[in-house]
Image: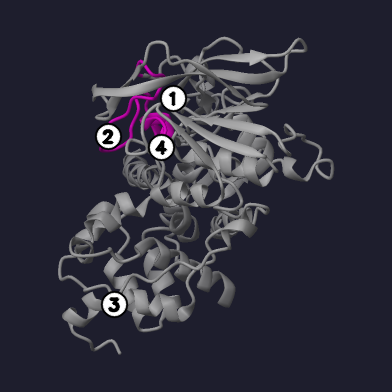
Amino acid sequence: MNEISKKDRMKIPRQPMPEQDKLERRTNFSEVNLGFTEELAKMEALRCLQCPKPICIEGCPVEVKISEFIKLVSEGDFLGAAQKIKEDNLLPAICGRVCPQEEQCEVKCVVGKKGEPVAIGRLERFVADFEREHTELRLPELKPKTGKRVAIVGSGPAGLSCAGDLIQMGHEVTVFEALHELGGVLIYGIPEFRLPKEIVKAEINSLRALGVEFVTNAVIGFTDTVDELLANDYDAVFIAVGAGLPYFLNIEGENLNGVYSSNEFLTRVNLMKAYRFPEFDTPVFNCKDKNVAVFGGGNTAMDAVRTSKRLGAKNAYIIYRRSDVEMPARKEEIHHAKEEGIEFILLANPKRFIGDENGWLKGVELVRMELGEPDASGRRKPIPIEGSEYILDIDMAVIAIGNGSNPIIQNTTPDLQFNKWGNISVNEETMETSKKGVFAGGDIVTGGATVILAMGAGRKAAKAINEYLSRS
């Protein structure tokens, strides 16, 4: 079946992703996308033209050998495909679920020039899941021990990616995590229905099996400073703490009961299992039969509003000041949200929150917007329409308009240079900071970005750290 012409390959349609029924899934936290069957995976893999110079790799921040692993899938060698991916990416089950392939590798796919691109991300997910379900963990070969020790601050995608590369290079690696669970944004920020926690734990366990040491409840800057890590026999430090400080709207009434940041709301639900209160101790606002509004248009906003629907919200709104054309969330997430009954209120911006005599949120005043000329982001600037204000009754609000950098490391590492946004300044080629032996990558450098871009930064830093350690 593999010996088919390029012309015939182009005729194969993109295979649909099996998923939960839209009415059923909005009542549970089980995964929405169910994954390819073996037959669907092989058929989708046959769509790949096996280009002599696969430019899809240019769109992958960790440079997975895409055409090679897809060829193995088409031949039914799923375990071989998994090993091929893991030459460059030790977290394929995560990336296959949450990375925006449509903006990265798939947008480069030649097949997509005349039709839909090959579903690279879905194939990556299939391969990773197949390996996990059908065989014991197979570990890559490690280089001889160098005697060098590296401290990694943060167990999100940048930190995990860096740890995986450094441990294979022969260095001792310790990952410090501020929370009681490992995974960073993967575990506290992304809901179970998009990324099951067991998937994250399995990927982390593979790093633990390689020899990576993990230390939880360690807030670097408080429990130890960066200087203390360097003084305590660590030869290098990689800072990958993400961007976990929420932005707010700074409008009247934002301190009312019932107003959350997306960080707090999603952390309570995802990490602390608030959706199973009182079985688990941490409560969250009772959304059942209530009106919930989420402000923002990115993936985090979609995660929050779809979570509120699963918690029983009668009406769940996305309120976004631009149109859906400018909305930065993945198209798949927007599509799933609409299927699940989320109402989109576009070209509207909040002016103030309204509370009752007991300090509980009861409504929000919105003003209608129109789009003007593009601003610095390249998107058309939203402009308020005078006299268009109106009140929307809501019981709960979630602010999901982005995050900044937590100032703890900045305040405790005076010789580390930061930019005006509070992000660490680095050499973009080596991820080196202004402080000798200290490297940084991920959202603490770029601001909020994607999982795979953070992983790419982690891999780039690992290479530079290895070169630095070989000289020291």
In the rendering, at what x and y percent does residue 157 appear? 47, 45
Pick the residue in front: 287 or 84: 287
Q: Position of residue 196 (x, y in %)?
A: 60, 55
Q: Which residues are magenta?
A: 419-448
Query: Farthest residue toward the right?
Result: 278
**N-terminal-most mark, 2 or 3:** 3
Q: CA distance from mark 2 to mark 3?
A: 41 Å
Q: Earlier in the sequence, mark 2 or mark 4?
A: 2
Q: Earlier in the sequence, mark 1 or mark 3?
A: 3
| Magenta stretch encompasses residue 156 | no
* Residue 443 is covered by the magenta coloring: yes
Q: Are marks 2 and 3 in contact (CB under 8 Å)?
A: no
Q: Say if residue 297 shows up in the picture.
A: yes
Q: Give the total of numbered labels.
A: 4
Q: Are marks 2 and 4 in contact (CB under 8 Å)?
A: no
Between circles 1 and 2, the one closer to the viewer is 1
Residue at 55% from the left image edge and 24% from the top image edge: 225
User: Of the residues shown, which amino acid type is indicated by label 4?
Assistant: Gly
Give the class, few, some or many, for how many residues have Cα within 10 Å of label 3's Cα (few <14, many ≥20).
few
Sequence-wise, the earlier of marks 3 and 4 is 3
Kind of residue indicated by mark 1? Ala
The residue carrying mark 2 is: 428
Query: Horizontal and vertical percent for residue 67?
Result: 27, 69
Q: Earlier in the sequence, mark 1 or mark 2?
A: 1
The secondary structure type at the circle numbered 3 is loop
- 52 or 285: nearer the viewer: 285
Q: Residue 43: where, in percent of width, then height? A: 36, 79
Q: Amino acid at mark 2?
A: Glu
* In-front residue for pair 7/280: 7
The residue labelled by disc 1 is 348
| Secondary structure category for the residue under label 2 | loop
